[in-house]
Image (cartoon, rainbow, N blue to C red):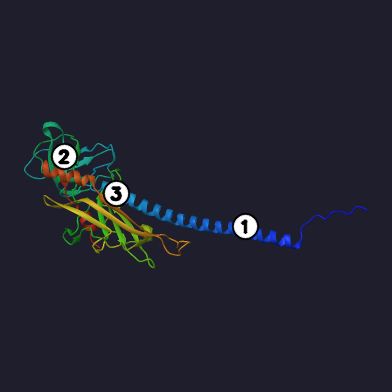
Amino acid sequence: MTRKKQVGFTLIETMVGLAVLFVVGGIVMSGMVQLMRTQGTIANRTDMHTSVRSATELLQQEIGQAGRISLAGPGANVTLAAAIAAGPNPTPFTLIASDLSNVALYPGEVLTVDLGIKQEVVTVATANGSSGTALFQVPHALAPVTALGAFATGIVPPGAAAPNSPGSTATVLKLYGDINGDGNMVYVEYTCVQGTAAAPGSLYRNAMAITAGAKPALDNTMILLNNVLTNPNDANGNPVPCFAYQVQPMVGGTCVTDVAVTLTVQTQNRDPQTNQFQQETKALLNVAPRNVVEVYDTSSLVDPLRAQVIPPSVSALLGP
C-alpha cells in the first residue's frame, strides 16, 4: 500500500513567510511614505518659486518700460487737425489720429511738430483731451506731431515728487508710462506689506489710467503674492527694504536709474518632513528703467527737453 505525500506548509513555515512579507511590505510602505513626503516638499517649493517668479518677472517688465510716453497707439499717425499760424501768444491746436482714444495732452508736455526746416519743439500751455494751446514760432500745415523722449520720473523718485505728493518708498513702488507698448499710459503702484510666518503679508499691484480721477483702494483682487515675509537683515544687520532706488540728479529734479527689488516669501503649506514653512528670498538687484535711463543720458548730453515732466493727473494720484 502506497502512502500519499502531503503537500503544503507547516504552521511555522507560514508564520515565517508572513513575517518576511510584513518586513518587506513595511520597507516598501516606508519608502512610499518618504517618497510622498519628498514629493510634497518639492511641490511646495515649486509652487512658491512659480508664484514669486511670476511676480518678479512682471515687476521687471514694468520697471523696464516705465517712463515711456505715447500720443496714440502703435502705428497711429498723429497730426495737426488744421493749419497753425505763428504768433507771440499761445495758439489753440487740435490733434487728429486714426485712433484718438489714447490721445491725452497735458500742460508742460513737450511736442515735436513738423519735419525738416519747419520742425520745432513746443510746450503745451493748456490742454483738454486732444486739444490744447502752445506758442508756435513757425507756421504749420497738417503737420505730424510726436512726443519724443520719456518721463524722467517714470519711476517716481523717493521724497516729494510734487507738492504734497509723496514719491516711491521702501514698501511702495510708483511708476507710470506706456508700460504695455499699446498707447495706453497707466499709473501703477506696487505695495509690499511684509508679515511673519504666522501672519504673512501681501504684494499688491494697483493699476489705473493716468487720467483716473482717484486711486482705487487696495483689495484682494490686486494681490500678486499673499505669502510675503519681512526680508532678512543684510550682512551689517540693517533691514532690507522691498524696493531700493538709485537716484540721479538732473535738470529740474531727480530721476531713478536703477531699482532693486527684494522679496521674501514662504510656502503656502507646511513641509511634510519638517512641519515648517519653507522660505526663500528673491532679489533683483539691478533693474533699469531703460526709457528713463535713455532720457537721462539724452537730457544730460543733448537735449534737456527730452525729459518730459510729470503730468498733473499723475501727481494727483501719488498721494494716499
| Residue 253 in view | yes
Asked if marks 2 and 3 touch (Cβ < 8 Å), the reply is no
SS of the residue under disc 3 = helix
Determine the CA span between mark 2 and mark 3.
Answer: 26 Å
Dot 2 corresponds to which residue? 112
Looking at the picture, which amino acid does disc 3 mark? Answer: Glu
> Which residue is located at x 17 percent, y 53 percent?
247
Q: Which mark is residue 24?
A: 1
> Which residue is located at x 73 percent, y 62 percent?
12
Residue placed most toward the observer, 30 or 233: 30
Determine the CA span between mark 1 and mark 2.
Answer: 82 Å
> Is label 2 or label 3 in front?
3
Q: Horizontally, is 113 left or right of 56 in the view?
A: left
SS of the residue under disc 1 = helix
| Image position, residue 216 (x, y; %) | 31, 59
Q: Quadrant of residue 81?
A: top left
Q: Residues within 10 Å of mark 3 (few under 14, many from 20)?
A: many
Looking at the picture, which amino acid does disc 2 mark? Answer: Thr
> Which residue is located at x 27 percent, y 45 percent?
102
| Image position, residue 96 (x, y; %) | 23, 39
Dot 3 corresponds to which residue? 62
SS of the residue under disc 2 = strand
Specify which label sits upstream in the sequence, 1 or 2: 1
